[in-house]
Image (spheres, rainbow, N blue to C red):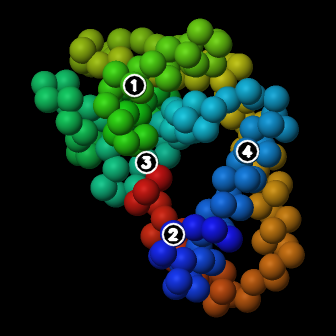
Amino acid sequence: MRYTSHMTDPLIGTLERVVVGSVAITARAIGTADAELTFMQWRVLLLIGESEDGVAPTAGTALDATPATGAAAATAATPHGAGATVGSIAARIGTQPSPASRVISRLKRRGLVHTSKDAVDARLVRVGLTEAGREIRRRVLESRGDNLAAILASASLSPVEAGTLTKLAQAFEQYA
C-alpha cells in the first residue's frame, strides 16, 4: 500500500485496508444497483433514508439546522418520516447548505428526492426520498449487505472479536 506516514503504525494500516475495502464494496454495490451515483449523492440518499426510517444520528452529529444561524443543532430528532433538512444534510456531509443544496437539486432532477417546506417552520426545507430513490437505496444497501455478510462469514469471528469489531464500529460512527 502507498499511503501516508501514519501507515507506519500497523493498526492504522489495518484500518486503512478496512476503509479502502469498504469504499470498494460501496462502489461495487452502487454499480450493481445501476444507480449511477457519485459517492456524495449516495451519502445524501443514505442520510435522507435514515431520517425517514427514524434512525437518529450519532451523538455529536447534526440533526437539524437552526434557521436563524444556519448552525447545526443537536437538540431534537427529526420527526419519523419527515425527511432531513438541507441544513442537517450539509452538517452530516461536512459542507455548507449551498453545496448540499446543489447535490439535492441534482438528485431531485433525477427524480430520486423531493423537497417540501417544514410543517412547523416554513424557513426549513425538508428532503425526502421518492419511490425511485427508496428503490435505489434498497438495492445498494442489499448488495452491500450481501458483501458484508460474506466477509463476516469468511472471517469466522469469535464472540470477543465480534465485540471488538462492534466497539470499533461505534468509534467510527462519530464520523458518519
Horizontal placement of 93 versus 152: left or right?
Answer: left
Q: Mark 2 or mark 1: which comes first in sequence?
A: 2
> What residue sits right under mark 4 in the picture?
27
From mark 1 to mark 4, how far is it between C-alphas? 22 Å
- The residue at 78%/71% (across/down) is 152
Residue type highlighted by circle 3:
Ala
From mark 3 to mark 1, how far is it between C-alphas? 23 Å
Q: Secondary structure at mark 1?
A: helix
Q: CB of mark 3 within 8 Å of CB of mark 1?
A: no
- Looking at the picture, tell me which residue is in the foreground, 88 or 8: 8
Can you see residue 142?
Answer: no
Q: Secondary structure at mark 4?
A: helix
From mark 2 to mark 1, how far is it between C-alphas? 29 Å
Relative height, residue 160 to residue 57 (above, below)? below
Disc 4 crowd rating (10 Å Cα; few below 14, some 14-19, many 20+) is: some
Residue type highlighted by circle 1:
Pro
- The residue at 50%/14% (across/down) is 105
> What residue sits right under mark 1 in the picture?
99
Give the image location of residue 69, x and y in percent.
14, 29
- Looking at the picture, tell me which residue is in the foreground, 92 or 36: 36
Disc 1 crowd rating (10 Å Cα; few below 14, some 14-19, many 20+) is: few
Circle on res. 56: 3
Residue type highlighted by circle 2:
Thr
Q: Mark 3 or mark 2: which comes first in sequence?
A: 2
